[in-house]
Image (tube, rainbow, N blue to C red):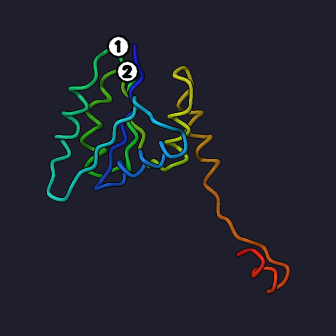
Amino acid sequence: MSRKIYFISHNDFAKGLKRSVEMIAGKQPNVTAYGLEPGGDPNEIVRQIEADIDTTDTVIILGDLEGGSVCNAALRLTVRPNVTLIAGTNLALALQVVLSSPEANLDDEIEEARKRIKKLKLKVSAVNDVEGLF
C-alpha cells in the first residue's frame, strides 16, 4: 500500500507548487503535478491519474479551484473509497499534507493549513524604523 499525492491545477500552478514543496521539504517521489494547458482536456489529467493508481493506494488529490474544470473532472475519482480530493490548495496545505504521516486525519491537516492563512502587517513605531529593516 502506497500513498500518492497529486497536485492538479490550471496551467503551471501545480508544477510550481511541487517545486516549492520540494525546495522546502526535499524531493518527494510520491508527489506528481499536472497542469491543464490552454486548450487542454482536464479529463486527460484524470486519465493519467487513473492509470497510475489502484485500490491499494491511498490517493490524495490537491486541486486549485473548487468548481474549476480540473477539479470537476477529478471529482469522478472520489467514488473510489481510497481517493480524496481537496480543492483550494495553497503551499501551506500542500506542505501539511506532504509532511503528514499516512495515518493523519486529512480534516485535521486542512484545519492546520487554514490556521496559516493570516493577514500580516508590519507595525512600525516611527518612520525611521522601516529603513533599518531593509
**In the rendered structure, which amino acid carries the disc numbered 2?**
Asn
Whether residue 20 is situated above or below residue 27 in the rendered picture: below
**Residue 82's disc number:** 2
Query: In the rendered image, which quarter is residue 105 located in?
Result: top right
Near-viewer residue (47 or 133): 133
Q: Residue furthest right?
A: 125
| Sequence-first disc among 2 and 1 | 1
- Could you tell me which quadrant the C terminus lies in? bottom right
**Side of 14 where 124 appears, left or right:** right
Q: Nearer the viewer, mark 2 or mark 1?
A: 1
Q: Residue at x 81, y 85 (%)?
A: 128
Q: CA distance from mark 2 to mark 1?
A: 8 Å
Residue 99, given in percent of the width and then of the height, sits at 55, 33
Secondary structure found at label 2: loop
Report which residue position mark 1 lands on: 56
- Return the mark for residue 3: none
Mark 2–mark 1 contact, CB under 8 Å?
A: yes
Q: Nearer the viewer, residue 131 or 127?
A: 131
Task: Identify the residue at image location x=36%, y=54%.
Answer: 13
Residue 96 coordinates in the image, percent (x, y): 56, 38
Query: Regarding mark 1 in the picture, which secondary structure is present there?
Result: loop
Q: Quadrant of the N terminus?
A: top left
Residue 95: x and y in percent read 53, 41
Q: Residue 76: where, in percent of width, then height?
A: 26, 33
Q: Residues within 10 Å of mark 2 (few under 14, many from 20)?
A: some
Q: Quadrant of residue 32?
A: top left
Task: Identify the residue shown where x is 21% and y is 55%.
Answer: 37
Q: Report the amino acid beneath label 1.
A: Thr
How many neighbours does mark 1 have within 10 angstroms: few (below 14), some (14-19), or many (20 or more)? few
